[in-house]
Image (cartoon, helix red, strand yellow):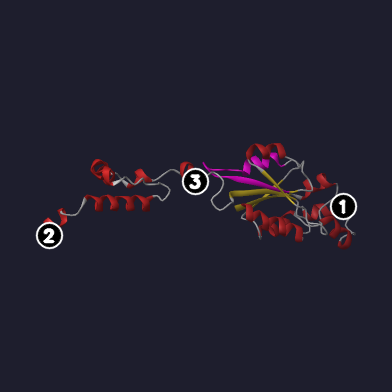
Amino acid sequence: MYSNTQSSLPSSTSKSTSSIKNDRINPLITQTNHSDDDNTESSSSTSSSIDQPESAFTLPRSASVPGLWIDNRADKVYTVGCFDLFHEGHRILLERMREFGREVIVGVHDSRSIHKLKNRVPVEGTETRMLNVKRYADQVYCVGGTDPSNFVQCIVHLKENESAVYIRGDDMAEFPSRHIVEALMPIKFLPYTNGVSSTKLRQELYSHIQANDIEHLEKVN
């Protein structure tokens, strides 16, 4: 009695079940509904699709989603800076980086390279500046030279289909290593935060530290 009931199920029910199963496996695949006139002809193809393994309906990422970006963010977002006397402008930049990428990776210049770049010694040491940045970043690395090109090339590692973007303040469009960065990822310039800067804080609070104070540089490097 049971076997007769099972065999009496219409073929359209089997086809509907197959369509639901396929939709759950990958909602990106659009199923085409045939008209009633095609039911007999399509029954054999429907039956064969049920026998196929589920992996046959799974699209690779490169074919199923765009390279940029499911949640409008890149996989990784990068920048490089000095971050001396960490202030509100630094915080805003790092927090905005999170809006453009899921993993925030920041290079921080060591004290000697800042001395060469800006012709003045930094107030804070390399470790202090890196720890300040780490509160907002996933990874922080030290840039031990005035040109961060080689450091950027070493730290940037993108797996297949991973996306990345580089963030800079718009106060320095022609920044060191721009030609290297552009070959690796797009660059996004963010507005400079007016009214606050490390230079201003230094003049107001640390004017006793001379620009060429090598003794201080040895202490904070």
Q: Name the amino acid, label 3.
A: Val
Whether 181 is among the magenta residues is no
Q: Circle 3 sits in a helix, a strand or a loop, which is it?
A: loop
Q: Are marks 1 and 3 in contact (CB under 8 Å)?
A: no
Identify the image quadrant of residue 200: bottom right
Q: CA distance from mark 2 to mark 3?
A: 46 Å
Whether 149 is among the magenta residues is yes
In x, y percent, where is residue 72? 58, 51
In x, y percent, where is residue 108? 71, 50
Q: Nearer the viewer, residue 111 or 28?
A: 28
Q: Which mark is residue 2?
A: 2
In x, y percent, where is residue 9? 19, 54
Please give left or right for residue 44 compared with residue 75 in the image: left
Q: Which of the two discs, 1 and 3, labels the residue nearer the N terminus?
A: 3
Q: Name the amino acid, label 1.
A: Asp
Q: Name the amino acid, label 2.
A: Tyr
Q: Nearer the viewer, residue 174 or 106?
A: 174
Residue that numbered label 1 is attached to: 213
Q: Residues within 10 Å of mark 3 (few under 14, many from 20)?
A: few
Q: CA distance from mark 2 to mark 1?
A: 94 Å
The span picked out in magenta is 148-168
Q: Residue at x 43, y 48 (%)?
A: 28
**Closer to viewer: mark 2 or mark 1:** 2
Q: Are marks 2 and 3 in contact (CB under 8 Å)?
A: no
Q: Nearer the viewer, residue 152 or 172?
A: 172
Q: Circle 1 sits in a helix, a strand or a loop, which is it?
A: loop
Residue that numbered label 3 is attached to: 65
Q: Is residue 108 something that shows in the picture?
A: no
In x, y percent, where is residue 55? 35, 45
